[in-house]
Image (cartoon, rainbow, N blue to C red):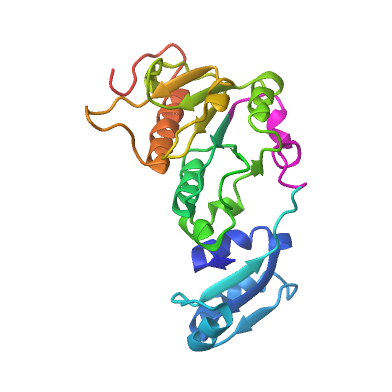
Amino acid sequence: MAESERVLSRLVRTPERLHAVLLSPGRWDALRDMLGGLGGRIPVYVADLEIMCDIAGFHVHRGVLATGIRPTIEELSPEVALAPLKRPGPLTILVCEGITNVDNIGGLFRNAAAFGVDGVLLDPACCDPLYRKAVRVSAGHVLSTPWAVAVDWPADLRRLREEWNVDLVAAETGAGATPWWSRPAPARQAILLGSEARGVSAGALAECDAVCEIPMSEGVPSMNVATTSAVFLAERARRRAEPAGSVGAIGA
């Protein structure tokens, strides 16, 4: 389910996934032109906010709701959902393990879109990115960013390295972790993030090429996982944009 005009505008870009739209009279007037491009193929219903709330079962304060068609389990497998990413060429993948907070999942997808991530791979324990609040927090980017759910975890991480030819780095603190900005930024790289409570599992760490951390002040062991992803992705994007042979990094 999609809420807000911003999220609906992203869902409209893939009309094959759009099921129906429910709007308040004021939002229908504002969005009539955008929805007119659907050519009447998608039903659009208009109702007062009070009726919308009764239909939805929760408070609808922006006057925009839409239902979408979920991908099947088969469509969300890495071999299907991320198939184009196996081809040679620059690649950045965000990998998530055990992220069960919908706000964090939404934030991770928003950050992924902001920094040009090509795809997101989730382990089976992650919460549903298509949960209503996760979609809203992502600003709708979960609807346009390719993502998949691992079928065989953590063995799928090994396949990323061996078959997709990516450098797999775990974002984790502790013994053996090196500063993120000291790690090379190869053309094809995946960044693995774990839950805030447990971090990256031992099994997943064993599949990684390296473990990198964000150096922080003493007494602060970690950051919010969505914030961590933004720091990692921003640094990777910055270094990938540098001219060949240049030097320098955050904190250098």
Quarter of the image for residue 62 reads bottom left
Residue 182 image point, x, y percent:
39, 16
Note whether residue 34 is visible. Answer: no
**Residue furthest left in the image:** 218
Relative to 78, residue 49 above or below? below
Q: Residue at x 37, y 41 (%)?
A: 224
Residue 212 image point, x, y percent:
42, 22
Residue 107 image point, x, y percent:
45, 48
**Residue furthest top in the image:** 245
Note whether residue 172 is visible. Answer: yes
Quarter of the image for residue 88 reads top right
Residue 25 image point, x, y percent:
52, 85
Count how many numbered circles sit on residues in the image. 0
Relative to 135, residue 200 above or below? above
Residue situated in front as seen by the camera: 252 or 32: 252
Residue situated in front as seen by the camera: 59 or 110: 59
Q: Quadrant of the C terminus?
A: top left
Report whether 228 appears left or right of 23.
left
Taking the magenta stretch, the answer to whether it contains residue 82 is yes
Residue situated in front as seen by the camera: 28 or 50: 50
Residue numbers of the magenta segment = 74-91
Q: Residue at x 33, y 34 (%)?
A: 222
Q: Quadrant of the N terminus?
A: bottom right
Taking the magenta stretch, the answer to whether it contains residue 85 is yes
